Amino acid sequence: MKLITNAQRERMLKNGRLTAQGETIDPHPVVKLFTPNGAATWLLTELDPSQPDVAFGLCDLGVGCPELGYVSLAELASVRGRLGLAVERDLHFQADKPLSAYTAAALKAEAIVT
């Protein structure tokens, strides 16, 4: 399974272009990725138009320190957990608030809460 769909890629590139143009945006996460046999989760909102493999969003490696940052989709696609399972896209995730709200909740809970 691809980490992001073509439609998600387009939405994330659009958000990335707005940020690159100096716009201040607070979009809803476009995609949620997670490790099925671990505690890592990523809520991603945009792709860097100059490096379309680099995504921005809320990243939580499952150690109690969620943070906003950048991540390589190619690196995520290569990650395998102890059982050999790859990072997956949450097919049922529907963001109901902007990234800032997820970030505030994650900092309080010390983990991404969806």
Image: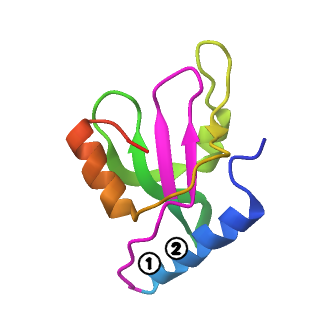
Please state which amino acid type lies under the numbered disc 2.
Gly
Which portion, as a residue range, is magenta?
22-44
- Asked whether 38 falls inside the magenta stretch, the response is yes
Which of these two is toward me, 80 or 89? 89
x%, y% of residue 24? 35, 81
For residue 16, the mark is: 2
Relative to 25, residue 82 above or below: above
In this view, the residue in front, 78 or 103, is 103
Please provide percent x and percent y for residue 54.
55, 58
Residue 29, labelled with which disc? none
* Residue sitting farthest toward the top: 83
Q: Amino acid at mark 1?
A: Thr
* Contact? badges 2 and 1 (CB < 8 Å): yes
Does the segment drawn in magenta span residue 93?
no
Q: Main structural element of the magenta stretch: helix, strand or loop?
A: loop
For this orientation, the residue located farthest to the left is: 108
Instruction: From the image, tell me which residue sits under label 1.
Output: 19
Identify the residue shown where x is 48% and y is 51%.
Answer: 43
Q: Position of residue 72 (x, y in %)?
A: 56, 49
The residue lying at 59 percent from left, 68 percent from top is 12
What residue lies at 32% left-to-right and 41% top-to-bottom?
A: 66
Assign a secondary structure to mark 1.
Answer: helix
From this view, report whether residue 40 is shown above or below residue 4: above
**Is the C terminus in the top left, top right, bottom left or bottom right quadrant?**
top left
Q: How many marks?
A: 2
Q: Position of residue 33 (x, y in %)?
A: 57, 43
| 109 relative position to 35: left or right | left
Residue at (67% x, 29% y) in the render? 86
Q: Point out the image quarter for the N terminus.
A: top right
